[in-house]
Image (cartoon, coloured by chain):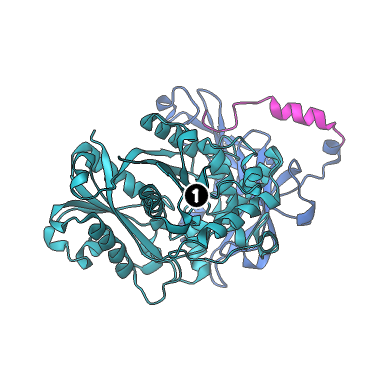
Chain colours: A blue, B cyan
Amino acid sequence: MSIARFWRETPQRYNLGGSKCSQCEAVYFPPRSVCPACAKHRTSLGRMLPFQLSGDGEVYTFTVVHEAAEGFEMQVPYVLAIVRTKEGPMLTGQIVDIEPADVRVGLKVQSTFRKLREEGKAGVIHYGYKFTPRADPGDSARPPAAEASEAEATPGRTGVAA
Amino acid sequence: MREVAILGIGQTKFGELWDRSFREIGIEAGFQALVDAKLSSHDLGALYLGNMASGSLIDQEHIAPLILDYAGLSGHHFPAIRVEGGGASGALALHQGYLAVASGAHDFVVVGGAEKLTDVPDTEGNRIATSTADHEWEAVFGATLPSLWALMARRHMFEHGTTREELAQVAVHAHEMGSKNPNAHYRNRLSLDAVLHATPVAEPLGMLDCAPLSDGAAAVVLGPLERARKFTDTPVRIAASQVACDSMAVQHRRDLTTLDSTVVAAKRAFAQARRAPADVHVLELNDSYTIAALMGLEDLGFARKGESGKRFSAGEFRGGEGLSVNPSGGLKAQGAPFGAVGVAQAVEIVRQLRGEAGDRQRPGAALGMTQTVGGTGATSVVHLFERAN
């Protein structure tokens, strides 16, 4: 992969920069230039604003990968998940700093900045987001029901076309 | 729009064809179909060739005229067009051929599908398969094609109670059916235990939940139904040909346990043919990963959510008077040469509707269906085929 091809996605991969439709307020990651959910789909062009994701979320589904993707051979077995973020968008990424056997659907996670892979000894090193279990005491003290209702409070804003 | 019929079929053996090149298998399938249709090459209007990754697999793009050339047809100068849509490439080529004949643009066309996977190492084949998913937002983060289907499998288990054993039953079923198909890549039967204890790939999926990397080619000849009787006593009408697409990445789907592209393509197909799932006798559906077959049965309208695994486990779908599913052995046992898959599925349905499927014949088959999926479901192609007599 050329350096530019990875470098141009840096704001998203390093900082979870997404986008928000200024017409219907739907949030997307990665950022989009038109809003798939918006009734005024055509006029959303040029009206998608930058939107920062917090990195908070929970595991929506996961797998333990044993046959690695290219460049990930040294990491097997690794946990790959789709994380549902607090703001709605779903992200695909690794869950790290946890035993694979302890990962479950619903696990609360927080994004973290890590090395993704190296392109050989002399190649580019790719960095980006992974997720770690959220160990914030204030958070774990909150009743699970409150978490659930908060997550349910933003239906239809998940960045998925209706 | 004119009614379109399949006049001839051809298919190579699927598997590791070390001694055969891309050109050879492509030409073999095409000529079988022409001979079967008793059609002169002078009558042909176009070639549509489904192929997913020849550039990556054999360093050769621009392959449609290449196949035309080596089939001895370049002197006719008719159009040869490659069609690509991941693992659905062959079915998309069939859709294009169907549209060409239905519209009257051409009278007779050959639709081929061909892929040569064993000219690269397995790891390279897997990387190329993963390129049908979203590279920038899935693969870059460590996703592989099987791991993305595994993410759907885990969610299906979580939401609908599907079990690991039910997934494994799909592979057992595929090899049972494939054991009766002389063209199949694998003809061995599998025990449930063997599938459950195979090397893990992406949990819950193991090695035997995944279709193999195969070489192979298949072809059909299409023509207007009103002229079909001149060429064959057993024309098969294409009752519906529908394509639907969805978001590229799994993470952006409305529901991770459903392929909306399949749901929509199937609804459109049943509407076009004025038929319902209960009318279908024989179905070739995508079982590139075991979870895909369970979701496919549900999304096409043959089972409720969470029900298909239980019905596979009960030994349904093996023929008899009920619905026969993947009598060819499916992608799992017959093999999965990406671009050839959709055409091979149609070839199997034509055999079934003609009553020429030997030991795996579904008695009295009159209506058949195919579902072909690209990547993780960004493209679904659904066809319905009917015996035209």
A122 horizontally vs B168: left or right: left
Compare residues B82 and B280 and report the one nearer the observer. Answer: B280
Secondary structure state at the residue bearing disc 1: loop
The answer to whether residue B181 is visible is yes
Using the rendered view, name the quadrant where residue A75 is placed: bottom right
Query: Looking at the image, is B125 positioned above or below residue B1?
Result: below
User: Over which residues does the magenta segment extend?
Assistant: A141-162
Query: Looking at the image, is A35 positioned above or below residue B137?
Result: above
What quarter of the picture does the C terminus of chain B occupy? top left
The answer to whether residue A130 is visible is no
B120 horizontally vs B222: left or right: right
Using the rendered view, name the quadrant where residue B147 is placed: bottom right
Q: Residues within 10 Å of mark 1 (few under 14, many from 20)?
A: many
As for residue A144 lying within the magenta part, the answer is: yes
As for residue B237 lying within the magenta part, the answer is: no
Q: Chain of mark 1?
A: B
What quarter of the picture does the N terminus of chain B occupy? top left
Percent x, y of residue B14: 43, 65
Query: Looking at the image, is B363 positioned above or below residue B38?
Result: above
Q: Mark 1 is on which residue type? A: Asn
Percent x, y of residue B388: 30, 40
Using the rendered view, name the quadrant where residue B63 is placed: bottom left
Percent x, y of residue B243: 39, 39
Percent x, y of residue A127: 60, 56
Query: Looking at the image, is B263 positioned above or below residue A132?
Result: above
Compare residues A141 and B118 and report the one nearer the observer. Answer: B118
Residue bearing mark 1: B286
Residue occupying image coordinates x 40% and y 53%: B348
Residue occupying image coordinates x 52% and y 43%: B321
B23 horizontally vs B353: left or right: left
Compare residues B285 and B201 and report the one nearer the observer. Answer: B285
Compare residues B177 and B186 and report the one nearer the observer. Answer: B177
